[in-house]
Amino acid sequence: MNPVRKITCRTITESVKRLFIEANTELGKDVLAVVRRARRGETSERARHALRQIEENADIAGKEKAALCQDTGLAVVFAEVGQDVRVAGGDFSEAVQEGVRRAYREGFFRKSLCDPLTRKNTGDNTPAVIHTEIVPGDRIRITAMPKGGGSENASSLHMLLPTAGIDGIRKAVIETVEKAGPNPCPPVIVGVGIGGTMDRSLLLAKKALLRPLNEKQRDRRLAKLERELLKDINQLGIGPQGYGGKTTALAVHVTMEPCHIASLPVAVNIQCHAARHKTAII
Ligand code: SF4
């Protein structure tokens, strides 16, 4: 039997706090590299200007430890908890929520959560949405993802007929991006989850957004689909911030799992250019 490793709630809270502060103030180098490349390839001056502003904004936010965007998001947390870990000194979920609370207070980030009916703000940006998975090992891998409202609103779920095939999937994705237009603050990253159940496909789509932009798709069929979707999306002409141009999306990431023989769930989760997520292993 493997020895159990103790991780305190205090360590979890501190890690979550640090990750949300970093995620909200530092744009990933992988995202910046693709934005830079897109700017060089743009022929429209307005599109180039919008992309340059994204780079300048990221530069200022990083130097001044200020939020990349006024919408500092709903706090989404992915936690892979090793089965040989014992969480000590309290409750795991509450430790995560406390980390979020402190990050938004100490980082001076906007608190963006409210009661859906009264619209009264919860006051501390909690509750975070926590996705927990039990995995082998004695570590906890935590990913913090502040998710903006504009891009989340543009996301969609399609319960396609099994006969819809690859063409049906492609149509669902393109239509979602086209309908969203400039609302999710393009250039976007498009996460696509195919398969599983209705809820599973949505989670796959969101997790697809966590793949670094410089990491290749290993499945050759999906790599081809990603390339084709990116090309089609960038022909829509929405462009950076909706000013027109060739860069509506920076990337399309697809994740797929088997589904029921009677189903073909396809979820599309849109991520704006403020593609924020940070990971730590404790
Ligand atoms: S969609 Fe993204 S860039 Fe636009 S306001 Fe929301 S967080 Fe900011």
Image (cartoon, rainbow, N blue to C red):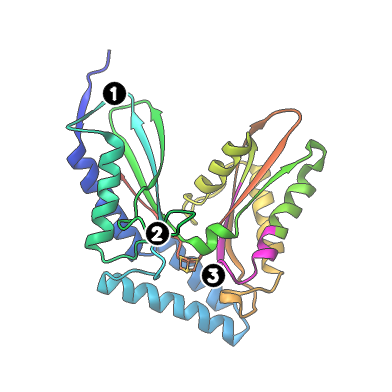
Given the current orientation, which residue lies at the most extreme front position?
A: 118
Q: Give the vertical position of 167 relative to 46 (above or below).
A: above
For residue 61, what is the image quadrant? bottom left
The residues tagged by marks 2 and 3 sit, at their Cα atoms, a distance apart of 26 Å
Query: N-terminal of the two: label 1 or label 3?
Result: 1
Q: Which residue is mark 3?
A: 185
Residue 166 in sight: yes
Task: Say which residue label 1 marks.
Answer: 84
Which of disc 3 and disc 2 is earlier in sequence?
2
Looking at the picture, tell me which residue is in the foreground, 101 or 120.
120
Q: Position of residue 197 (x, y in %)?
A: 63, 34
Residue 49: x and y in percent read: 52, 84
Magenta run includes residue 87: no
Report the span colored magenta.
176-192
Left or right relative to 191: residue 144: left
Element type at mark 2: loop
Residue marked by disc 2:
120
Determine if the C-beta at disc 1 is less than 8 A from ligand 1: no
**Which amino acid type is marked by label 3?**
Cys
Badge nearest the viewer, 2 or 1: 2
Q: Amino acid at mark 2?
A: Lys
Q: Is mark 3 within 8 Å of ligand 1?
A: yes
Q: Is residue 120 above or below residue 279?
A: below
Left or right: residue 3 versus residue 264 is: left
Residue type at mark 1 is Asp
Q: Are marks 2 and 3 in contact (CB under 8 Å)?
A: no
> Split into 4 quadrants, where in the image is the N terminus?
top left
Quadrant housing the C terminus: top left
